[in-house]
Amino acid sequence: MRLAVGGDLSGLPLKGPVINFLESHGHDVTDFGTHEGVEVDFPDITQTVCDEIRSGNIDRAVLVCGTGVGACIAANKIPGIRAALCHDIYSAHQCVEHDDVNVLCLGAQIVGNKLVEEILLAFVNATFSTEEHFRRRVAKLADMEKRAASEFSG
């Protein structure tokens, strides 16, 4: 799977282990920063990572900040992005299976290296359900995005 990983300085301690673990499991990972000593605001790194998903260059992404909350809020502002904050294994696979989530948000101050490995495996190994009710609900989310965009564009 083609994955993007990004985070702010608060996420930096967990970002490296996330990348190393994903690569060790055969995924093609692109690191969009931040890097040691380079300050970046989480909305900026989130926009960069999510643009890669929207362009089709990346399949899914992992964003790491202090709690994961800010990155999740920022990602969910971007059309076509469905981000979930997951600090447990069940949510990490269920969000993909039921809601077709394409961005996993993590808090470096919340989860440790061992738990994050299990969360990452659950996220990348999950697939969106073919059950009609889940597909219908995700289609409704896309309709909500379109309605909101049209209401505020004119």
Image (cartoon, grey):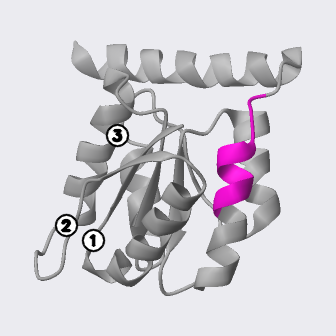
Circle 2: residue type: Asp
* Stretch in magenta: 120-128
Residue 128: x and y, percent? 74, 29
Alpha-carbon distance for marks 3 and 2? 14 Å
Q: Would you place residue 45 above or below residue 100 in this image? A: below
Q: Could you say which disc has been placed on residue 50 in the image? A: 3
Circle 3: residue type: Cys
Q: Which of marks 3 and 2 is nearer the N terminus?
A: 2
Residue 104: x and y, percent? 55, 54
Which structural element holds mark 2? loop
Which structural element holds mark 3? helix
Pointers 1 and 2 in contact (CB under 8 A)? yes
Residue 122 seen anywhere in this rendered image of the structure: yes
Alpha-carbon distance for marks 1 and 3? 15 Å
Residue for point 27% across, 63% down: 42
- Nearer to us of marks 3 and 2 is 3
Residue beneath label 2, please? Answer: 41
Q: Which residue is more in the foreground, 90 or 144? A: 90
